[in-house]
Image (tube, rainbow, N blue to C red):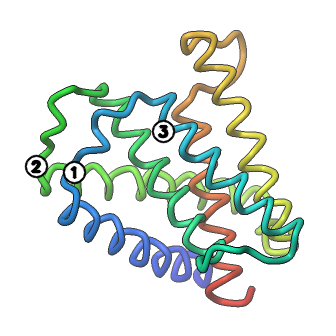
Amino acid sequence: MNTTSKQYDSIIKICSDIFTKKMKDYGSAWRILRPSSITDQIFIKAKRIRSIEEKGFSKVDEGIREDYIGIINYCIMGLVQLELGYNENTELKFDEAKHLYDKYFLQAKSLMENKNHDYDEAWRDMRLSSLTDLILMKLLRTRQIEDNKGKTLISEGIDANYLDMINYAVFAMIKIEHNS
């Protein structure tokens, strides 16, 4: 488990670095997005990964690694939007955005550690394509919950699905970065 925790932290660093640089380039323009629009952005990234997995190549000079990073960062943005609500005034100070980013990434890591204990790191024996499919399934669930105005009868909410997608994407990144 210690190895997984260290590898997870290395993925946090990669994703956080990109989030930080994009915040400096673009500010918090993403704050205008409704959670359903963020879900659709994640869907686009996951569909591209699946398309590349099935075709075996991409015509755009960008691999699936960047799309998994995008999934992670969009999921965190989605969690922020669920907490704060989307806003026409997109201003979110850098320090506050970074604090919220770190808060949700640590929440996802804590969830991963608990589930990883129970599942005994089963993800390590999974194919990368299965992680992509799990993300797509979580996206379809999330879209259904959004279409139901956030109401569920027995299932976890949108936030739980975002957290699971973060962890599936981190597992994929660990497999890519550490050849695990």
Place of residue 56 in the rendered image (x, y in percent of width and height, measured from the top left)? 86, 76
Q: Residue 155's spot in the image, x, y percent?
A: 70, 22
Per the model, the C-alpha gap separating discs 2 and 3 is: 20 Å
Identify residue for label 1.
97
Instruction: Name the amino acid type tagged 1.
Output: Ala
Mark 1 vs 2: CB contact within 8 A: yes
At 65% from the left edge and 89% from the top edge, which residue is drawn? Answer: 178
Give the label, 2 or 3, closer to the camera.
3
Residue lying farthest bottom? Answer: 179
**Residue on which the image places disc 3:** 38
| Residue ID at (56%, 51%) | 111
Label 2 packing within 10 angstroms: few (<14), some (14-19), many (20+): few
Could you give the CA–CA distance between mark 1 and mark 2, rounded to whole angstroms?
A: 6 Å
Instruction: State the residue position of label 2.
Output: 93
The 10 Å Cα crowd at callout 1, few under 14, some 14 to 19, many 20 or more, is some
Quarter of the figure with the N terminus? bottom right
Q: Quadrant of residue 180?
A: bottom right
Q: Determine whether, in the image, residue 119 is placed left or right of residue 40.
A: right
Label 1 SS:
helix
Q: Residues within 10 Å of mark 3 (few under 14, many from 20)?
A: many
Going by the numbered disc 2, the residue's amino acid type is Lys
Residue 170 position within the rendered picture, expressed as x and y whole percent measured from the top left: 60, 66
Residue drawn at x 59%, y 65% as measured from the top left: 68
- The residue tagged with tag 2: helix, strand or loop? loop
Query: Is the residue 127 above or below the residue 109 in the image?
Result: below
Distance from label 3 to label 1 (Cα)?
A: 16 Å
Which SS class for mark 3? helix
In the shown orientation, is residue 137 left or right of residue 92? right
The residue positioned 52% from the left and 34% from the top of the image is 159
| Mark 2 or mark 3: whose residue is earlier in sequence | 3
